[in-house]
């Protein structure tokens, strides 16, 4: 009998007895606990024990341990009653949980041995796990790194998100380019989540505001759905503390099914609230081109905020009942709410509503509590990402909240008029409500800034731009409200677990593994950067990772790549400002030059494998054209016998955390080439640098700080700076731009049809002309192209010097200590949340 993977299904081994043992530490005990779950927590037909069955049983044996630690943590927090942080995010990009949990609990050896006793390798079982489809890009991955650090630093904190059944989408590449199909990570079930049937809150949409005889207001009528909690345990590294990511699922109640209509054959009508509830957590970022799409997105955002705040308040009530003396004015000394970008902005009016309408507070007291509780992280200066919601849509879906937002705005504007006459003419841009009669909107970022006690950017350059440009007038009102918190990444997932060979070498040379939780210790590698023995070990770890990556690429794309070539990688969301188009135009120019060379000239060049990956949003046409172009170029280059020894081009499909864990350790050059001033921070740049990969990039986002830390001689810099960009755009509008001949040559080569018959005209048009929608090269690809090509030539020269390159690689890792999310989260805890470590004894 074969299982779904085509392998013969294995039966349960009889020589190991099934025994429940949540505290198992030793291989035989763990094996017994795995067998226990295969037998007594069954999800499959009996007698089978194939790799998939082994994954679920293994995960559940580990979950036993996590639940025990989570319970201990929860009881301890309850006893100590510290101030807690609640992190609200629309996205979490968790990646696989099995190897991460085993690693954080320091059980790799025992689990690997236990699975061998059952006839499996740990790597084979880990491969069965699907990534949780709860996020899309850097925003979600940052949130997941933050949770890991909160747990590792023993901080009293929770994450709140939504339980999307089908995520953003699974990307498949066909002859047409990118196509999207639903994610299937919950097709069976997730072994990690624990449903909390006792944690359910009602969430209302639509309806009207009822004014009571005493003048108080209440939101009534409309649709009411139920928010059901699912908890995912998040273990810290080398600590008992295990915190929770609480995900909300939307449901309707049994009585919301109209049995009379159903029995009349009106099935859709009878179950319409069930259907509408189910839509809320179906996908992440549903298309919002239609009114229904906008409504659904707004529903998602409010659903997250309302369920989370009701949960937070109920916990505060529980403690108040237990202690008998707690007042609402104590709330901000027990609760910190962090809004990850503008998606959870509705937490502000919802907290006000819950305090006033449900708990009887007056406006001033509710405002005092709210404005001392919430803080806001800004992640972008891109205008389209600063959310603005139609006022009419908001009145329709959330009438009570619009009343509250109007009142916040009215009071803020009055304060400006009373105290800052010099800002009178700025009120129209500072106010929360934009009452432009053509398109009246609510400006969510303005609501966040006005209402939060702290606003932070996510890299020094980004925070400086926020203070000098985007929020400059707010800074003049509240100079102490704005901070920088440079992003970070967890060194556990992004070095210790994804590149064990390299991390073992680091531990050997530093004579300690303390760097895993104190990443600044990596500076100790600098003194050995010229050491031939270290360089030799470093090179062997890197080639092992490159070989593993080459095998993966061949398996998923069918393209065979040479592990001795320079591995050049750009992986991130496909967006014009991230300039994957500049990368592929550079590749096209390289290909054309290789074709023009004589065979003996080609032999002198540095062989290079260029890998590009990332998802283009389903409705973002130009981004999808870029994906298509990369694939078309790859088809031509990789099948050209004259050139394919010296250049390969691969589009890596369905980029996610697990793919990143394969790509990043195997990379040697990584491209972070956004138009300066447009990338808030970036975090993949930190992951690549930590793994000894050199960066070619602009002075944008965290690149600025990475270059300072690793040394400017170990960073391939090019391109305009953020302060030059406005002038360059103006010069372009005025017709003063003179394109580089190489840029023109690359574009012409595409137009010649050498990469197939697809019409790339509309994509290339974005680089043409001086002004106009979709034209005028807004992201300055043409301006930066010559310096980009010059920097790539320096890369080739540097790569020829193997010892020099290895030294640069070691110094890159040695300079990455600052970019630990442990450092970032320690700063948030001290400087924004005012919370302290609460380790489980």
Image: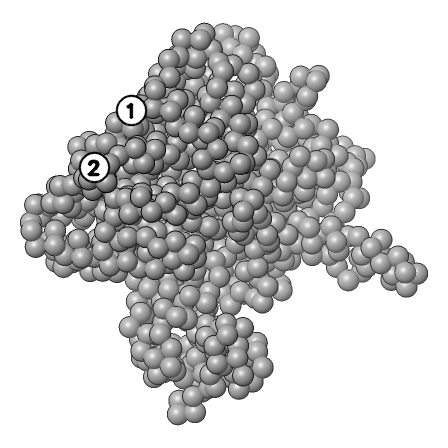
Q: Is residue 632 above or below residue 782?
A: below
Q: Which residue is under mark 1?
A: 787
Q: Is residue 545 above or below residue 774?
A: below
Which residue is depicted at the point 42% across and 81% down? 33
In the figure, is residue 360 to the left or right of 86?
A: right
SS at circle 2: helix
Looking at this view, name the residue that lies furthest to the right.
264
In the figure, is residue 667 to the left or right of 426?
A: left
Q: Residues within 10 Å of mark 2 (few under 14, many from 20)?
A: few
* Marking on residue 162: none
Q: Which residue is under mark 2?
A: 601
Which residue is depicted at the point 54% across and 73% down? 4
| Quarter in which the N terminus is drawn | bottom right
Residue 764: give x, y in percent of width and height: 49, 26
Residue 614: give x, y in percent of width and height: 45, 44
In the figure, is residue 261 to the left or right of 286?
A: right
Q: Is residue 374 visible?
A: no
| The quarter of the displayed image where residue 367 is located | top right
| Quarter in which the C terminus is drawn | bottom left
Residue 546: give x, y in percent of width and height: 27, 54
Color encoding of the figure: one colour
The residue nearer to you, when weighing 136 against 514, is: 136
Q: Residues within 10 Å of mark 1 (few under 14, many from 20)?
A: some
The residue nearer to you, when weighing 729 against 131, is: 729
SS at circle 1: helix
Residue 299: give x, y in percent of width and height: 66, 43
Q: Earlier in the sequence, mark 1 or mark 2?
A: 2
């Amino acid at each position: 009998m074969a299982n779904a993977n085509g392998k013969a299904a294995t039966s349960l081994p009889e020589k190991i007895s099934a025994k429940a043992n949540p505290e198992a530490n030793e291989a035989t005990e763990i094996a017994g606990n795995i067998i226990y779950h295969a037998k007594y927590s069954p999800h499959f037909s009996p007698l089978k024990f194939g790799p998939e069955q082994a994954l679920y049983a293994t995960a559940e044996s580990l979950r036993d341990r996590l639940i025990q630690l989570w319970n201990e943590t929860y009881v301890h927090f309850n006893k100590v009653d510290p101030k807690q942080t609640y992190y609200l995010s629309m996205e979490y990009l968790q990646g696989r949980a099995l190897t991460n949990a085993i690693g954080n609990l320091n059980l790799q050896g025992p689990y690997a041995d236990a699975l061998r006793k059952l006839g499996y390798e740990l790597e084979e079982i880990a491969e069965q796990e699907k990534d949780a489809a709860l996020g899309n890009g850097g925003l979600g991955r940052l949130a997941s790194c933050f949770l890991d650090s909160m747990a590792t630093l023993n901080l009293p904190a929770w994450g709140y998100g939504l339980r999307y059944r089908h995520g953003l989408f699974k990307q498949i590449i066909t002859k047409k380019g990118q196509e999207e199909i639903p994610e299937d990570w919950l097709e069976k079930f997730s072994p990690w989540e624990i449903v909390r049937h006792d944690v359910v809150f009602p969430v209302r949409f639509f309806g009207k505001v009822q004014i009571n005889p005493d003048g108080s207001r209440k939101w009534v009528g409309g649709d009411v759905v139920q928010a059901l909690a699912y908890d995912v345990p998040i273990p810290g590294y080398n600590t008992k503390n295990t915190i929770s990511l609480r995900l909300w699922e939307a449901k309707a109640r049994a009585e919301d099914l109209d049995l009379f209509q159903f029995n009349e054959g009106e099935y859709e009508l009878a179950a319409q609230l069930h259907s509408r509830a189910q839509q809320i957590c179906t996908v992440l970022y549903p298309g919002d081109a239609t009114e229904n799409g906008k409504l659904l997105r707004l529903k998602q955002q409010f659903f997250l905020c309302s369920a989370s705040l009701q949960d937070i308040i109920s916990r505060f009530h529980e403690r108040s009942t237990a202690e008998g003396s707690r007042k609402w004015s104590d709330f901000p000394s027990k609760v910190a709410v962090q809004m990850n970008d503008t998606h959870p902005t509705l937490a502000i009016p919802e907290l006000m509503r819950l305090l006033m309408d449900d708990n009887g507070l007056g406006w001033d007291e509710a405002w005092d509590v709210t404005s001392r509780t919430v803080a806001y992280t800004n992640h972008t200066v891109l205008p389209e990402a600063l959310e603005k919601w139609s006022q009419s849509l908001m009145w329709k879906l959330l009438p009570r909240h619009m009343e509250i937002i109007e009142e916040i705005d009215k009071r803020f504007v009055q304060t400006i008029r009373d105290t800052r006459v010099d800002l009178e003419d700025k009120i129209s841009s500072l106010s929360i409500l934009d009452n432009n009669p053509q398109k009246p909107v609510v400006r969510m970022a303005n609501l966040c800034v006005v209402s939060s006690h702290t606003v932070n950017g996510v890299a020094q350059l980004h925070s400086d731009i926020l203070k000098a440009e985007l929020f400059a007038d707010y800074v003049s009102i509240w100079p102490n409200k704005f901070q920088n918190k440079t992003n970070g990444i967890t060194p556990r997932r992004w070095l210790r677990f994804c590149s064990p060979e390299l991390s073992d070498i680091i531990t050997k040379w530093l004579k300690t593994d303390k760097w895993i939780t104190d990443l600044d210790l990596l500076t100790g590698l600098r003194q050995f950067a010229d050491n031939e023995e270290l360089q030799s070990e470093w090179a062997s770890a890197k080639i092992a990772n490159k070989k593993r990556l080459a095998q993966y690429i061949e398996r998923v794309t069918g393209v065979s790549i040479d592990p001795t070539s320079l591995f050049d990688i750009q992986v991130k969301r496909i967006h014009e400002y991230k300039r994957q188009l500049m990368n592929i135009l550079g590749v096209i120019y390289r290909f054309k030059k290789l074709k023009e060379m004589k065979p003996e000239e080609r032999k002198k060049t540095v062989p290079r494998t260029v890998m590009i990956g990332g998802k283009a949003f389903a409705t973002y046409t130009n981004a999808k054209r870029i994906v298509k172009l990369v694939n078309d170029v790859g088809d031509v280059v990789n099948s050209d016998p004259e050139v394919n020894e010296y250049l390969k081009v691969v589009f890596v499909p369905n980029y996610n955390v697990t793919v990143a864990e394969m790509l990043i350790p195997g990379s040697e050059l990584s491209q972070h080439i956004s138009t300066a001033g447009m990338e808030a921070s970036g975090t993949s740049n930190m992951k690549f640098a930590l793994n000894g990969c050199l960066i070619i990039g602009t002075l944008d986002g965290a690149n600025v700080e990475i270059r300072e830390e690793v040394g400017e001689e170990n960073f391939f810099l090019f391109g305009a700076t953020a302060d030059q960009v406005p002038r360059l755009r103006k010069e372009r509008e005025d017709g003063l731009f003179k394109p580089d001949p190489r840029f023109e040559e690359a574009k012409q080569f595409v137009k010649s049809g050498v990469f197939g018959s697809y019409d790339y005209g509309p994509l290339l048009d974005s680089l043409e002309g001086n002004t106009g929608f979709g034209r005028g090269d807004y992201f300055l690809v043409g301006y930066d192209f010559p310096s980009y090509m010059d920097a790539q030539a320096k890369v080739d020269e540097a790569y020829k010097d193997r010892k020099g390159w290895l030294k640069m690689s070691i110094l890159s890792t040695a300079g990455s200590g600052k970019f630990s999310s442990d450092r970032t989260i320690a700063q948030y805890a001290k400087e924004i949340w005012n919370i302290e470590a609460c380790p489980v004894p």
